[in-house]
Image (tube, rainbow, N blue to C red):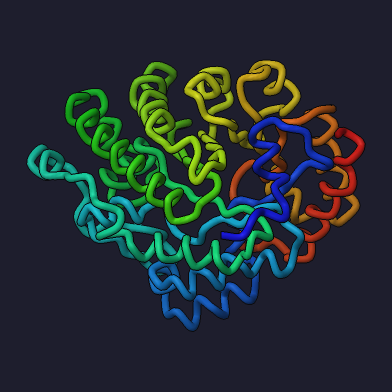
């Protein structure tokens, strides 16, 4: 495969010197782009998009055609793994993802098996190969998965939740059952991410979207412990090249040192954390990714530039920063404002390197 022309993102994750701070955006291929909406319409549905490697490649490349981003991220969904376990993923209009067969009883949980990625998730791996080829080495490709605990939230609740009543009931009443599920999820995530790396992903990210909804003790026991297992099971390099890992717990500001200590290359930050304080806490253990409030992109270009400048200034001089939003971009964001942000980061960050 072609050598990387722009490896700024990989070097930043490895805390190596870079000429500027690289930037990519969570959900950068998404509904804020009219071209994405047009492709999704052709695909017929979100799953029609995600399960077709041609469409997945097309939408992955769309933001890179508009903006000089420093990385591409595979277009997929975190719930492909439980779907491959037979839970029956579907999307209800206006309601987000749901499962036909949520896991509530012991028999169903003990019947869970780790899916073989090449068999049940081949469409994702085909997309990775195709995207990597289409990028031609222009920028790195990020693969990703949900965390074992976040996947379990959807698998038990059957979709999104306001209070996580079902999974938290299990956590306290039947921790053995939840640990059994989390062990299977961790092994599934390791197999899935390693298969993505073998197919061509050059960095991987684990999204722990719901870990921050746990108590301190429960986070360490039911989320962080399984994140540690995932990171320890990943390929650290492939074909002689390092493959860095990023872990992002939304609402995880209390546990940054603990997250860094599991061995990931970078810790993702949501917008509630001061990135300078996070850097002082983590020290040289890991790089940082983040963490502009996505709502800043609703403001005017001068404000976007100023707010991006604040994040860069708070991080300060030196290496080990990948600029991103503190969560996924809103579908209501004006696309031009993303261009303003990317240009601002590239322009203003040179002074810090």
Q: Is residue 46 left or right of residue 256?
A: left
Q: Is residue 175 left or right of residue 146?
A: left
Q: Residue furthest front?
A: 240
Q: Nearer the viewer, residue 349 or 156?
A: 349
The image shows residue 280, relative to residue 246, as above or below, that is above
Quadrant (top left/top right/bottom left/bottom right) for the N terminus: bottom right
Residue name at image x 63 percent, y 76 percent:
35
The image shows residue 280, relative to residue 184, as above or below, that is above
Q: Position of residue 53 (x, y in %)?
A: 44, 71
Residue name at image x 40 percent, y 39 percent:
147
The image shows residue 335, relative to residue 141, as above or below, that is below
Tell me which corner region of the image, top left, top right, bottom left or bottom right, holds residue 325: top right
Q: Position of residue 25 (x, y in %)?
A: 65, 52
Any part of residue 242 in sight: yes
Q: Position of residue 267 (x, y in %)?
A: 58, 31
Q: Is residue 290 left or right of residue 346?
A: left
Q: Position of residue 176 (x, y in %)?
A: 18, 25
Residue name at image x 72 percent, y 55 percent:
5
Any part of residue 214 in sight: no
Quadrant (top left/top right/bottom left/bottom right) for the C terminus: top right
The image shows residue 301, relative to residue 327, as above or below, that is below
Residue name at image x 57 percent, y 75 percent:
37
Q: How many marks?
A: 0
Tell me which corner region of the image, top left, top right, bottom left or bottom right, holds residue 83: bottom left
Q: Residue furthest left?
A: 107
């Amino acid at each position: 495969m072609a050598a990387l022309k722009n490896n700024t993102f990989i070097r930043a994750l490895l805390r190596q010197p870079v000429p500027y701070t690289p930037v990519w955006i969570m959900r950068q291929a998404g509904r804020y782009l009219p071209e994405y909406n047009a492709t999704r319409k052709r695909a017929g549905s979100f799953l029609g998009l995600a399960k077709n490697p041609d469409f997945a490649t097309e939408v992955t490349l769309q933001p890179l055609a508009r903006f000089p981003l420093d990385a591409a991220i595979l277009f997929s969904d975190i719930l492909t793994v439980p779907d491959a376990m037979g839970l029956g993923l579907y999307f209800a209009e206006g309601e987000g993802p749901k499962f036909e067969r949520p896991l509530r009883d012991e028999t169903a949980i003990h019947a869970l098996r780790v899916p073989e990625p090449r068999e049940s998730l081949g469409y994702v791996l085909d997309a990775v190969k195709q995207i990597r080829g289409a990028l031609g080495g222009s920028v790195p490709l990020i693969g990703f998965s949900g965390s074992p605990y976040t996947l379990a939230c959807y698998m038990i609740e059957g979709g999104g939740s306001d209070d996580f009543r079902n999974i938290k009931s299990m956590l306290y009443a039947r921790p053995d059952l939840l640990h059994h599920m989390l062990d299977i999820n961790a092994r599934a995530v390791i197999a899935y991410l390693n298969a993505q790396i073998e197919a061509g992903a050059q960095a991987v990210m684990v999204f722990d979207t719901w870990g921050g909804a746990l108590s301190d003790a429960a986070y360490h026991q039911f989320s962080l412990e399984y994140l540690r297992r995932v990171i320890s099971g990943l390929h650290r390099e492939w074909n002689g090249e390092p493959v860095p890992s990023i872990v992002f717990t939304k609402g995880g500001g209390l546990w940054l040192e603990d997250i860094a200590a599991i061995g990931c290359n970078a810790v993702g930050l949501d917008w509630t954390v001061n990135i300078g304080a996070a850097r002082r806490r983590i020290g040289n253990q890991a790089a940082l990714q983040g963490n502009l409030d996505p709502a800043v992109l609703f403001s005017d270009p001068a404000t976007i530039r100023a707010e991006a400048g604040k994040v860069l200034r708070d991080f300060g001089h030196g290496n080990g920063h990948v600029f991103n939003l503190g969560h996924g971009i809103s579908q209501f964001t004006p696309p031009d404002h993303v261009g303003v942000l990317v240009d601002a980061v590239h322009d203003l960050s040179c002074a810090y390197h």
